[in-house]
């Protein structure tokens, strides 16, 4: 692993998406990644706000930057920030506000947001803004641990805990977009935005996550360009312009997807009373909560739904199987879009099962948790575990003959 800050470097590709002007304020960190301390800079210990929220902050911003829109409530600074594990990463900010009404498909306008505020002084501050943008953090309770348009400390703490499991960007092969810092928003802003709510108030602390991402290309949802929606544009964006590059892209995609499907056994530990613990997924999914790097590697980016669970020994194999099935279809659907694009551009093996077997064998040959076994009727995947307990190994059929 190499952590190299990159100063004003040119990216290897241009991030697609709408430009957003963001304003920087120094902030107090709530949590920081102890494993990546060497990357903490003043830009990390900051929050970034759209101009629509500036009237609700007492102090003037320290800097102004052009970001690229990412997902519903995030943005990415389009200059490379660091190189880790041979990948180029950009700074991403989660919790900058949303542009869409949570209970309709209509834009969340300043007038509508202001109409929800009962306190006149705060309402007039918001309505008197000359901002051209309509992007707001609100006080509406959203998904248990966060306010709509923002990020809550509860969710951010779960995400940071998941980050701390990693060495660099890897949890035994499962690749993550690491969080560097979780920063509190200014108190006056927090108080003001909490008065913007529809039905239920969010009472926790509001923060922003400052994290590293290799791109803003999601698998199927929450991105302008996705593997599932437009593989052609993704190939163009990442300059996949030869059969060799396409082959390597598919191998990296499969390798990282298999690690995601088998996260539980890769993090398995034994607890007391015959219970076993490992990481599992809650309310997060491969199709919308992961991004893809230019070489095809999948990085899970929304870590707030990755937590440890405990099961009894007799349930370990069942949990491994359930976790594989949870994302198997999403993985195979995205793989099929990639392989169709490869065949369209460069030709090659037309039998999908033969091609998948070739790629799968290459992808997992150095994976210590995966052994492929051919019984004549199927190509099976023997899933091992961190405890080297052969009785907890699980056999899963990946390809029928």
Image (cartoon, rainbow, N blue to C red):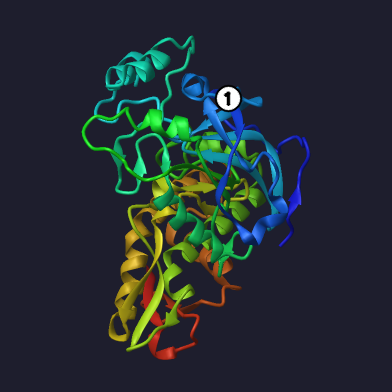
Decide which of 90, 235 is in the foreground and name it. 90
Quadrant including the C terminus: bottom left
Does residue 74 appear left or right of residue 307 in this picture? right
Q: Residue at x 65, y 46 (%)?
A: 89
Residue at mark 1:
59
* Residue 123 appears in the picture as rendered: yes
Tell me the crowding category of disc 1: few under 14, some 14 to 19, or many 20 or more residues within 10 angstroms, Cα based: few
Query: Residue 78 at x, y = what percent?
Result: 64, 33
Q: Whole-percent x and y of residue 74?
A: 49, 36
Against 340, residue 167 (above or below) is below
Tell me the element at label 1.
loop
Tell me if I can see residue 401 in this picture: no
The reply, left or right, for residue 320 in relation to residue 181 is left
Task: Specify whether 390 is left or right of 347.
Answer: left
Question: In front: 245, or 320?
Answer: 320
Looking at the figure, which quarter contains the N terminus? bottom right
Tell me which residue sits at (47%, 73%) in the image.
Answer: 267
Q: Is residue 20 left or right of residue 150?
A: right
What residue is drawn where x is 60% and y is 59%?
Answer: 169
Q: How many marks?
A: 1
Q: Which residue is at the front of the view, 167 or 64? A: 64
- Percent of width and height locating residue 29: 57, 47
Residue 237 location, x and y as percent?
60, 35
């Amino acid at each position: 692993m190499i952590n190299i800050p990159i100063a004003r470097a040119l990216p290897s590709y241009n991030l697609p998406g709408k430009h957003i002007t963001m304003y920087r304020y120094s902030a107090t960190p709530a949590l920081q990644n102890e494993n990546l301390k060497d990357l903490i800079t003043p830009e990390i210990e900051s929050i970034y706000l759209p101009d629509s929220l500036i009237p609700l902050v007492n102090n003037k911003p320290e800097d102004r930057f052009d970001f690229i829109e990412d997902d519903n409530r995030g943005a990415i600074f389009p200059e490379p920030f660091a190189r880790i594990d041979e990948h180029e990463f950009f700074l991403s900010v989660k919790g900058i506000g949303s542009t869409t009404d949570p209970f309709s498909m209509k834009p969340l306008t300043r007038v509508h947001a202001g109409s929800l505020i009962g306190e006149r002084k705060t309402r007039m501050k918001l309505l008197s803004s000359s901002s051209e943008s309509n992007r707001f953090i609100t006080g509406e309770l959203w998904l248990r641990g966060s306010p709509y348009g923002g990020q809550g400390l509860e969710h951010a703490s779960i995400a940071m805990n998941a980050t701390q499991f990693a060495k660099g960007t890897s949890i035994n092969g499962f690749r993550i977009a690491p969080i560097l810092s979780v920063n509190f928003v200014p108190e006056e802003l927090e108080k003001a935005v909490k008065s913007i709510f529809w039905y239920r108030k969010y009472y926790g602390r509001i923060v922003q996550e400052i994290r590293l991402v290799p791109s803003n290309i999601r698998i199927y949802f929450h991105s302008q360009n996705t593997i599932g929606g437009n593989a052609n544009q993704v190939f163009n964006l990442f300059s996949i312009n030869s059969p060799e590059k396409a082959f390597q892209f598919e191998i990296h995609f499969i390798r990282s997807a298999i690690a995601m499907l088998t996260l539980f056994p890769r993090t398995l530990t034994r607890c007391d009373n015959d219970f076993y613990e490992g990481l599992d997924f809650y309310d997060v999914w491969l199709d919308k909560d992961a991004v893809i790097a230019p070489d095809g590697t999948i990085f899970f980016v929304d870590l707030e739904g990755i937590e440890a669970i405990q099961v009894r020994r007799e349930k370990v194999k069942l949990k491994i199987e359930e976790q594989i099935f949870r994302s198997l279809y999403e993985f195979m659907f995205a793989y099929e879009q990639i392989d169709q694009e490869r065949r369209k551009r460069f030709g090659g093996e037309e039998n999908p099962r033969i091609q998948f077997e070739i790629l799968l064998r290459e992808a997992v040959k150095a994976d210590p948790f995966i052994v492929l076994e051919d019984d004549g009727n199927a190509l099976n995947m023997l899933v091992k575990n961190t405890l080297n307990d052969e009785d907890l190994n699980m056999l899963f059929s990946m390809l029928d003959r």
